[in-house]
Every structure is written in C-alpha cells, then in structure tokens.
C-alpha cells in the first residue's frame, strides 16, 4: 500500500513537472537560461534539452550546491556531461564507460550501478573516488588551482579523455543550462509573474522539483538528500505564485472577493493564507510529503521526526534575513517555513 502511494505520488509529481514545463514554456525562459524543450548549441552540434536531460542537469547542479561546489565547478560538470553524451545517462559507451559522465570502472570510478546513478556519478565527478581495489579516479576538487584555470582547462583536467576543444565549446551552453536550472534572478521570470525573484529548483526525494527561495535551497537540498539516505522520501510543494494562491483560496475559502482576499485564514478548510500573505509566495515555506503522503500527524511520523530533530544541522546556515528558525505551523503538521507562518 505504501509502495503504491509512493508510485502515485511520483507519478503526479511527474505530471505537475511536465505540465508546468509544457504549458509554461515561454514563462520558464529566465533570461539566458535554457529550459526543457529548448535547443542546446555547442561548438560541435545542436540537440534538444529534453525533460530527462534537464533532470540530469538538475542533479549535477543540486549535488554541487549541496556540497558547496562553487558555481563555476557546477558549470564545468555540466560541460563535461554535455560533451560526453548530451546529458544522457547511457548504460554503455566507448571502452566500458557508462553514465552521465561516461566514467570508466578500471579508472576507479566505481561499479556500473554507481556510474549510472546520476547523483553518485555527480558526487564523484566533484570529489573523485577510490574504488575497492585502491584505484583513484581524480575529481575536480583534487585538481590544485582549478578555480584559477579557465573552465575549459579545468574540465579537461578532470576528464582527460575528452577533446579539449570540444569541452571548451560547451562551456557557454553549460552556463545557460545552469541558469535554467537555478532559475536566475530577475528579468523575464519576474515579468511573467510566474516566479519570484530568486526561486530555484531543489530535487526532492521523489526525484521531482520543489521550488524555493535560493536562500534556503542548499539547506533544503542537503536535508532531503540525507533523509533519502535513511530511506525517507521527503518531497512537497514550496513556492506558489499569487495566482495559484488565489485558486487555493477559491477552493478552500469560497469564491467571493471577501472569501478570496479578506476572510481570515482560519475560516478556510483547510486554513489557507490570504494572497500575498503566504510564505509560499516568497518561496520560504514547504508543505512536506513523507514517502508520497502529506504529513498530517507528528508523533510517530518518521519524516516529521527527522525534520524536527535535524533541521538545525542544515538551516542554521541560511543567510535569509527573514529566518528565525525552520518552524512548523501549529495547525499544519506538513507546513514548515522560515517564520513558522
Ligand atoms: Zn503550506
């Protein structure tokens, strides 16, 4: 039953993600950022940034952020994955290579299962890896002075099998994909009203996207990653636009102007903040699901207990001026935000 619930949740998250990127293709074009469906141009060819390729790019960037890899390092990783196999995750390539970075077992990159797991492959691209036979694959952080190198040279230093001109010609495209993943601030994103200034994507435990403000994204990402390692699938909705908040108010409070804009939150079922008043509109709140089910109780709920116990480890680092703690709203066991509202 629980497994079925997770599958259903993953399915619906997938639908939301697909629906969002198809119907909103134009509004997703944040400045120079590339989004699913856009074409990617490198010095050696052009291809479509499919949903799946974008999801792989998202993993590369999120793993980078969660591990405090500077933005240039995330772009280098994207350029390598672009050049290796267009951000695909193929089971086999030349000379026994596999996965988004086409890592090779005999070089020390690990087992087939590990190399074709994008999250593990990305982690090792940054950190390198020593396999069970003591073979050491060199990661980005192993390269002395990589931050002072050109990004193309640094990419080639990690991935020596790649032709340096090819990977260098992919840097500009990698930067645009990076912008698309993190939902860069300002310009078109703001003018469409679809995104707040700094709303960025976090890859949640179910593999979908939770959109939150950039100031809390690394903390949320790290917490969701660690929860997943303990078998807890944390996901849920973060940022909501004003227009989606109005739709919720219509559904939960009533359709009159009074019901939508004036009625106290507590008179709605379930309680729903007035448009403009919700921390969700700032990307500073998340309604958590646990293994695919909304968290509706506290005691004995493993995800609630995980968040309640462990949030300081992640969220104390946040630099958000509104931050007074990662707090749960008393009336909603699922709702956590920087203010508790
Ligand atoms: Zn909420």
Image (tube, rainbow, N blue to C red):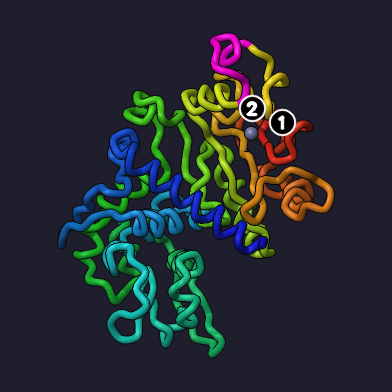
Give the number of the mark in front: 1 or 2.
1
Question: How crowded is the residue under tag 1: few (<14 C-alpha within 10 Å), some, or many (20+)?
Answer: some
- Ligand 1's quadrant: top right
> In the displayed image of the protein, which residue is found farthest to the bottom?
133
From what the image shows, is residue 168 above or below residue 315?
A: below
Q: Give coordinates of residue 97: x percent, y percent.
A: 35, 80
Horizontal side, residue 23 vs residue 163: left or right: right
What residue is disc 2 on?
322
The region drawn magenta spans 252-262
- Name the residue at 56% across, 27% down: 248
* Whether residue 158 is visible: no
Label 2 element class: loop
Residue 256 counted in the magenta span:
yes
> In the displayed image of the protein, which residue is found farthest to the left?
44
Give the quadrant of the N terminus.
bottom right
* Whether residue 126 is visible: yes
- Name the residue at 54% across, 10% down: 257
The answer to whether mark 2 is within 8 Å of ligand 1 is no
Residue 156 location, quadrant: bottom left
Residue 103 counted in the magenta span:
no
The answer to whether mark 1 is within 8 Å of ligand 1 is no
Provide the major secondary structure of the magenta segment: helix
- Name the residue at 62% across, 53% down: 292
- Name the residue at 29% across, 69% down: 84
Q: Give coordinates of residue 10: x percent, y percent.
A: 53, 55
Residue 150 location, quadrant: bottom left
**Residue 287: mark in rendering:** none
First in sequence: mark 1 or mark 2?
2
From what the image shows, is residue 138 above or below residue 218?
A: below
What residue is disc 1 on?
340
Pick whichever, 297 or 209, lies toward us.
297
């Amino acid at each position: 039953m629980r497994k079925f619930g997770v599958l259903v949740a993953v399915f619906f998250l997938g639908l939301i993600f697909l629906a969002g990127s198809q119907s909103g293709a134009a509004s997703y074009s944040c400045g120079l950022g590339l989004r699913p469906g856009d074409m990617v141009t490198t010095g050696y060819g052009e291809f479509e940034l499919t949903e799946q390729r974008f999801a792989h790019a998202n993993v590369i960037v999120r793993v980078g952020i969660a591990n405090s890899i500077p933005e240039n390092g995330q772009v280098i990783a994207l350029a390598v994955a672009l050049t290796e196999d267009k951000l695909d995750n193929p089971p086999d390539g030349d000379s026994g290579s596999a996965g988004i970075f086409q890592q090779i077992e005999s070089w020390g990159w690990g087992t087939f299962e590990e190399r074709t797991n994008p999250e593990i492959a990305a982690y090792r691209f940054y950190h390198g890896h020593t396999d069970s036979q003591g073979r050491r694959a060199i990661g980005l952080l192993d390269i002395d002075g990589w931050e002072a190198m050109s990004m193309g040279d640094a990419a080639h230093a990690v991935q020596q099998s790649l032709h340096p001109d090819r990977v260098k010609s992919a840097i500009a495209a990698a930067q645009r994909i990076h912008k698309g993943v993190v939902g860069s601030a300002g310009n078109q994103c703001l003018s469409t009203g679809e995104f707040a200034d700094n709303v960025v994507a976090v890859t949640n435990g179910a593999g979908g996207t939770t959109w939150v403000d950039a100031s809390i994204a690394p903390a949320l990402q790290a917490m969701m990653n660690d929860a997943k390692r303990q078998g807890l699938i944390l996901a849920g909705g973060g940022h909501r636009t004003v227009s989606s908040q109005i739709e919720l108010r219509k559904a939960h409070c009533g359709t009159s102007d009074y019901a939508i804009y004036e009625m106290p939150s507590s008179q709605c079922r379930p309680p729903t903040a007035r448009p403009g008043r919700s921390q969700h509109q700032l990307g500073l709140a998340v309604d958590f699901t646990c293994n695919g089910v909304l968290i509706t109780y506290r005691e004995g709920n493993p995800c609630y207990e995980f968040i309640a116990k462990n949030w300081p480890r992640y969220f104390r680092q946040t630099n958000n001026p509104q931050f007074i703690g990662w707090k749960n709203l008393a009336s909603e066991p699922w709702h956590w935000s920087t203010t508790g509202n």
